Amino acid sequence: MKKLVVFYSRTGTTSLVAQKIAEKINGDLEEIKDAKNRAGIIGFLRSGYEGARRKLTIIAETKYDPAQYDLIVIGTPVWAGNMSSPIRTYIVKNREKFNKVAFFCTLSMKDAPKIFQDMSETCQKEPVATAMFRRKEVIGNEFANKLNDFVSKIEAMGN
């Protein structure tokens, strides 16, 4: 089964989790590049605003065609309780090409109880697995159990 891990990361946390997932499931890795500068406090505020309003943005062309994969694992940071605008844009542009999907997110403080429901509705597909990773767990390298549980669900789907 061919797997693609697609992610957007503003600070590097989501990137670290995506890399670990791609290694464990032997999948290709696709980083979504945003045309907007999201650095610093202005970037942080812009990101939160766009997340809260479920805005789309301009993203760079991607390397991999999701239609060529059996499973797309989509990772996003949580912005104001929602998925990031670069990931929302990627999903809207590509959802017709998705076979099966799995979702993960990274977050700092508050839970985002509706993020996976929003991702599912935007993709128009139910995920085979979901996982939330807290920034402090990722930075402290204390997310192995959660990561392994997520990967186990993905691998069980392939059998």
Image (spheres, rainbow, N blue to C red):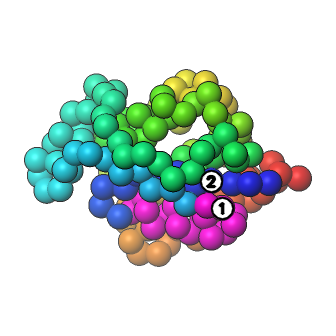
Return the residue at label 2: 4
In the image, taking residue 100 as reference, residue 84 lies left or right, namely left
In 3D space, how far apart are the residues under numbered discs 1 and 2 (Cα atoms)? 5 Å
Q: Quadrant of residue 147?
A: bottom right
Residue 133: tell me if it is visible: yes
Indicate the quadrant containing the N terminus: top left, top right, bottom left or bottom right: bottom right
Residue drawn at (69%, 54%) of the image: 3
In the rendered image, the vertical position of residue 135 relative to residue 75, given as above or below: below
The secondary structure that dominates the magenta segment is helix
Viewer-closest of 115 and 69 = 69
Q: Residues within 10 Å of mark 2 (few under 14, many from 20)?
A: many
Residue 51 numbered mark, or none: none
* Count of labels in the image: 2
Q: Farthest residue toward the right?
A: 159
Return the residue at label 1: 27
Residue drawn at (62%, 70%) of the image: 23
Image: magenta residue range:
13-28
Q: Amino acid at mark 1?
A: Gly
Q: Position of residue 24 (x, y in %)?
A: 67, 69
Q: Residues within 10 Å of mark 1 (few under 14, many from 20)?
A: many
Given contact means CB atoms under 8 Å apart, are the residues at marks 1 and 2 in contact?
yes
Q: Quadrant of residue 25?
A: bottom right
Residue drawn at (36%, 51%) of the image: 33
Viewer-closest of 44 and 32 = 32
